[in-house]
Every structure is written in structure tokens, then in C-alpha cells.
Amino acid sequence: MTIPAPAPKGSRSFNPRAFPGDLLDAQRELAGLYAALHAHQKTLPWSREASEGWQAEREHGRERAGRERTDGCV
């Protein structure tokens, strides 16, 4: 096993938690936009076209989720 040489005096050692502020700001903005997208998607109908939907089914241990009736995108 080799031991790494000490950093020269006056140089900063590597800190994996020291990210540039602009990258942190961009990551926070991305997280906010992602949350806004998902909040918007929850307001949309599950289908673009009108549909009567279907009942949930369970057969041989497999489940198929049901869907309610939708008027689609108006």
C-alpha cells in the first residue's frame, strides 16, 4: 500500500463537497422545474382522447390497474 505524498504548502486540498455556487444554483433550479413538471402532469387527464376507462383486474397474481372515465384533453 502506498501513502500519497502530502500536498505542497499553500495549495488547497481536494474537497469533494466544495462545488461551485453556479452549479449548485443550476441543480436547485433543475429540481424546482422537475417538481413543477410533475405537479402540472398530475392535473392532466390520463388520456388525450375520451375513454370509458376500465375496472381493475387481478388474475393469477397479476394486477392490472383500473382507470376512471375521462373526457380527454378538451
Image (cartoon, rainbow, N blue to C red):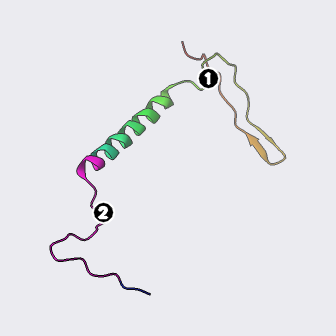
- Residue 15 inside the magenta-drawn segment: yes
Q: Nearer the viewer, mark 1 or mark 2?
A: 2
Q: Position of residue 10 (x, y in %)?
A: 15, 73
Q: Which residue is label 2 attached to?
A: 17
Residue 58 lies left or right of residue 26; in this view the side is right
* CB under 8 Å between discs 1 and 2: no
- The answer to whether residue 51 is above or below residue 6 is above
- Which residue is painted at 19% across and 71% down in the image? 11
Classify residue 56 as left or right of residue 35.
Answer: right
Going by the numbered disc 2, the residue's amino acid type is Arg
Examine the image and state in which quarter residue 57 appears: top right
Task: Write the start and end of the magenta stretch as one range.
Answer: 4-24
Q: Name the residue tied to disc 1.
A: 47
Name which residue type carries label 1: Ser
In the image, is residue 46 above or below residue 10?
A: above
* SS at badge 2: loop
Can you give x and y, in whole percent of width and height, for residue 34 in the image?
42, 38
Q: Farthest residue in the top direction?
A: 74
Q: Which of marks 1 and 2 is nearer the N terminus?
A: 2
Residue at figure coordinates x 24%, y 77% from the top left: 7
Residue 8 location, x and y as percent? 20, 77
Where does the C terminus fall, quadrant-wise? top right
Helix, strand or loop: magenta stretch: loop
Residue drawn at x 32%, y 65% as measured from the top left: 16
Q: Is residue 28 above or below residue 16?
A: above
Mark 2, Cα crowd under 10 Å, few <14 / some 14-19 / many 20+, is few
- Split into 4 quadrants, where in the image is the N terminus? bottom left
